[in-house]
Amino acid sequence: MVLFSARKSSQGFTLTEMLVIVAIVGILSAIVAPSFLGLLNRNKVSNAVVNLQGVLQEAQRESLRKSKTCTVNIPSSSNPTVTGPSGSSYCLITGDRVLKDISIRRDDTSLGTITFDFKGRTTTGGSDFQAIVFSVANDTSTPERCLMISNPLGVVRTGLYNDSSGSATTVDPNNSSTTPNCTISQ
């Protein structure tokens, strides 16, 4: 009686085949990783723009609803916290927002406060618009996005930022007016 019978046909993978598979997976992941990180950074910027647009629309809607002036503070910094007026809960009824891993900048740092009057119009003086530029903190390779707020209507639009000088606006030498470096998406 035969107790043990060895088969001639092998079942499974050899060590060489496993090493080839591991090498192929490693090469593919090295190729895909930068694209995936870029996708994550673009999503961070897009989410921050949508979040701030929602904050502004919420403040505008509450100023209309309550017939009161509503102010939103938007600091130009990395990891900013967007807040409503201190001691008042009627502007941002869903609370303050922290934009993690995001950098916000604008040309005029005094425009860190956006005020909506009781009719929902912006009362901040200055030019015909306010441009806010969003980027991933400490990353210059990710495309930047921008948010434009028209004065005095308070219409909020978003788009792609398209200037390498770092300025949110460009001065037109023909008429000394400023224009945004922002391609508005519809």
Image: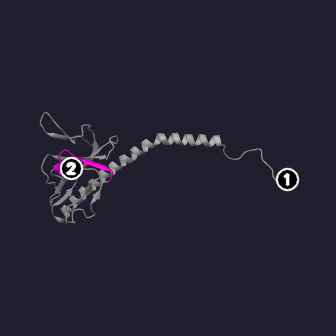
- Report the amino acid beneath label 1: Val
- Looking at the image, is 104 positioned above or below residue 59? above
Which segment did they paint magenta?
100-111
Secondary structure of residue under mark 2:
strand
Residue 110, how many percent across, how many down? Answer: 16, 50
- Circle 1 packing at 10 Å, graded few (<14), some (14-19), many (20+), is few
Residue 175, how many percent across, how many down? Answer: 12, 36
According to the picture, the residue beneath numbered tag 2 turns out to be: 149
What residue is at 17 percent from the left and 50 percent from the top?
Answer: 111
For the rendered model, the colour scheme is one colour
Residue 82, how many percent across, how many down? Answer: 25, 56
Foreground pick, 185 / 15: 15
**Is residue 11 found left or right of 176 in the rendered image?**
right
In what quadrant of the picture does the N terminus appear?
Answer: bottom right
- Circle 2 packing at 10 Å, graded few (<14), some (14-19), many (20+), is many
What residue is at 13 percent from the left and 47 percent from the top?
Answer: 126
Foreground mark, 2 or 1, reads: 1
According to the picture, the residue beneath numbered tag 1 turns out to be: 2
**Tag 2–tag 1 contact (CB < 8 Å):** no
Secondary structure of residue under mark 1:
loop
Tell me where residue 185 sits by quadrant.
top left
